[in-house]
Image (cartoon, rainbow, N blue to C red):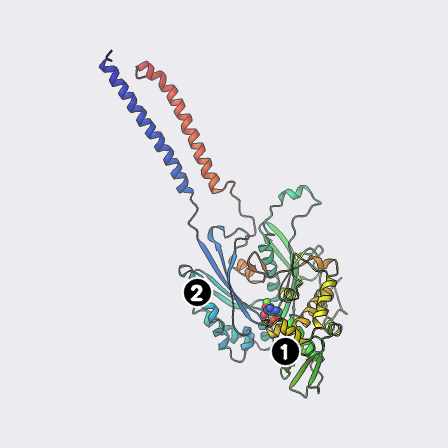
Amino acid sequence: MEQPRGTKQKKSCQKNVFIILGFLFILAIITIITVAIIQNKPLEKNVKYGIVLDAGSSHTNLYIYEWPAEKENDTGVVKQVDMCKVDGPGISSYYKEPEKAGLSLKKCMDEAKGVVPENRQRETPLYLGATAGMRLLSMVNPGLSDQVLSSVENNLELYPFDYQGARIITGQEEGAYGWITINYLLGKFVQDESWLSFFPGLKGSETFGALDLGGASTQITFVPENDIESPDNSLHFRLYGRSYNVYTHSFLCYGKDQALQQLFASNIKPTDTILQDPCFNVGYTRNVNVTGLYKNHCTAAYRKSLNVTNVQVIGTGNHDQCLQNVLEIFNRSQCTYSRCSFNGVFQPHLQGDFGAFSAFFFVMDFLKLADIKNPKSLEDAKETVRKFCSRPWQEVKVEFPKTKEKYLSEYCFSGTYILSLLEVGYGFNSTSWDSIRFVGKISGSDAGWTLGYMLNLTNMIPAELPPSRPLSHEGYVALMVVSSLVLVAVLLIIWLSCCKEKCLEKGII
Ligand SMILES: Nc1ncnc2c1ncn2[C@@H]1O[C@H](COP(=O)(O)OP(=O)(O)O)[C@@H](O)[C@H]1O
Ligand SMILES: [Ca+2]
C-alpha cells in the first residue's frame, strides 16, 4: 500500500536529521582529538650545545655537550658528543711565546665548528677553564699567565660561538665540579627519597666521592659523616631540592708530574750527573735538564745550588725503594685538626664510594687494575705494581709498542705514587679500597670537572626540584580523547532519549 505523501516527507526529514547529527558527532570528535594533539604537541626537538675547554697542565681537551632544550633542568640529560685532544702541551707551557697558546687550539676549535650545527653556533656557550699548570704559572709570574690567557681569548673570540671567557679555576672549583659531574652522570641527584623519611634508619642513595689526579694537582671531594673542621674545605650545595655539605681539597704540586718533579728535586745531588732512580724500569734512561728545576713553586722546598745542568736518570726498577722515596713527599708529622690527610690538611673520615678518574684511571687501566667486573684488592694492586717495576724496560717497550714512551716509562712511578697517595695520603685501607671505582667514562661522558662547570654556569642544575607533571604528554592526550568521547556519548544518549518522546509526540519517529 502506498504511504501518504506527508509520512514520506517526515521519513526523509528524519533521515536528514540523523545524517546531520552523525556528521556533527564525527566532526566534534575529530575536532577534539586534533585540538588536543596540536595544543599539547611538545615543542619541536630543540637540541642545545655547550663547549668546554679543559686547559690542563699537560694538555688541553675540548668537550662538546648536547641536551634537549625542553629538558634542560632534568638530571642526566646532557651528553658528551665529541672530545678533541689539542696537539702539543698544556697552555702554561707556552709562557715563553704566549701567542702560540691560542693558535694551538685551532684544530679542535675547527672541529667544534663541524660538530655544532651552524644554526646553533651563535647560541652555544664556549668556556675555557685552566687548572693547576696555569695556577703554578700565575704564582710564579702572573704577567705571563695573563698573556697566555689573552692569547687564548683572542683566538676563541674568532669563532662564531657564544664565548663566555677563559679563566683559571680554583682547586676548590675543580674538586666541586668533578664531584657534580660524576654524581650527575651516575644519576645520584634524581632519587625522590621522600618515602625514606618514614624509615629514619634508612639512608637514601648516597653520592659518590670524587678523586681526580692531574699532572700538577690532585683533588679529593666527598660528603663526610662528621663536621668539616676547616672552612676552606667546606662547600654547601642545594641541588634538586636536597642540601649537600661537601668536603673538598686540592693538593697543588701533588699531580703525578709535579710529584715526580719533587722526587727529582729532592734526590738529585749538587754535583752528580747521574741519578739512579728506583721508580723507572731497569734499562731506562732519560736526560733531565735541571737548570729550571728549582724555579718551580713545587720544588722550592728542595732548593739547592747545583753545579750541573743536565742529569741522566737511570732506572733501577726497585719498587720498595721507589715507595720509600715517594712516601717522603707526604708530610704526616703535623696536624692542628682532629685528623689530617697530609701536609697538615684537614680530612674527615672517608665516607661512601668513590669514583677515581683522570690519571687515576689512565694508570690503573694500563695496569689492568680498573676492571669493575674483576675488582682487585689493595694487596693485588701492590703486587701488580711491584711486578711491573721489576720488569726490564726493553721487555716493556716490546710488549707495548704503541703506548706513548712518556707514559709507559712512568707507569712504575705512577702506580707506586697512586697507591701511596690513596693509602698513606688519604688513608684508604684494604677494606675501604673496595669502595674505589676507577672510571674513565660514565654513560659515554668523560669523568672530569668540565661537565659540572658547564652545568653550573648555564644554570642547568636547579636548587629545587622542578614541579613534576602528573601525566606524560601521551597520557594527557589519551585521557582527553577518552573523556571527550564519553562526554559526547552521554550527551547524545540524553539528547536522543529526550528527543525520542518529543519526536514521537510530533510524529517525526
Ligand atoms: N694514557 C695516559 N697514561 C698515563 N697518564 C696519562 C695518560 N693520559 C694522560 N695522562 C696524564 O694525566 C694527567 C692529566 O693531567 P692534566 O689534566 O693535564 O693536569 P691538571 O689537572 O693537574 O691541570 C697528566 O699527568 C698526564 O700525563
Ligand atoms: Ca685535569
In the picture, measured across the screen, residue 119 lies left or right of residue 456, that is: left
509 in relation to 490, above or below? above
Residue 454 drawn at (x, y percent): 53, 60
Q: Amino acid at mark 1?
A: Asn
Mark linked to residue 296: 1
Residue 350 drawn at (x, y percent): 71, 58
| Label 2 residue SS | helix
Residue 484 drawn at (x, y percent): 42, 32
Q: Quadrant of ligand 1?
A: bottom right
Q: Residues within 10 Å of mark 1 (few under 14, many from 20)?
A: some
In the picture, measured across the screen, residue 428 lies left or right of residue 85, that is: right
Q: Nearer the viewer, residue 414 or 117?
A: 414
The residue positioned 33% from the left and 14% from the top of the image is 505
Q: Residue furthest left?
A: 5
- The image quadrant that residue 395 belongs to is bottom right
| Label 1 residue SS | loop
Q: Amino acid at mark 2?
A: Lys
Q: Residue furthest top?
A: 1
2 and 1 marks in contact (CB < 8 Å)? no
- The image quadrant that residue 157 belongs to is bottom left
113 in relation to 477, above or below? below
On the image, numbered disc 2 is attached to which residue?
113
Front: mark 2 or 1: 2
Quadrant for the C terminus, please: top left
39 in relation to 253, above or below? above
In the picture, measured across the screen, residue 123 lies left or right of residue 333, that is: left
Mark linked to residue 104: none
Q: Residues within 10 Å of mark 2 (few under 14, many from 20)?
A: some
Q: Residue furthest right?
A: 333
The residue positioned 58% from the left and 62% from the top of the image is 449
Quadrant for the N terminus, please: top left
Residue 58 drawn at (x, y percent): 58, 72
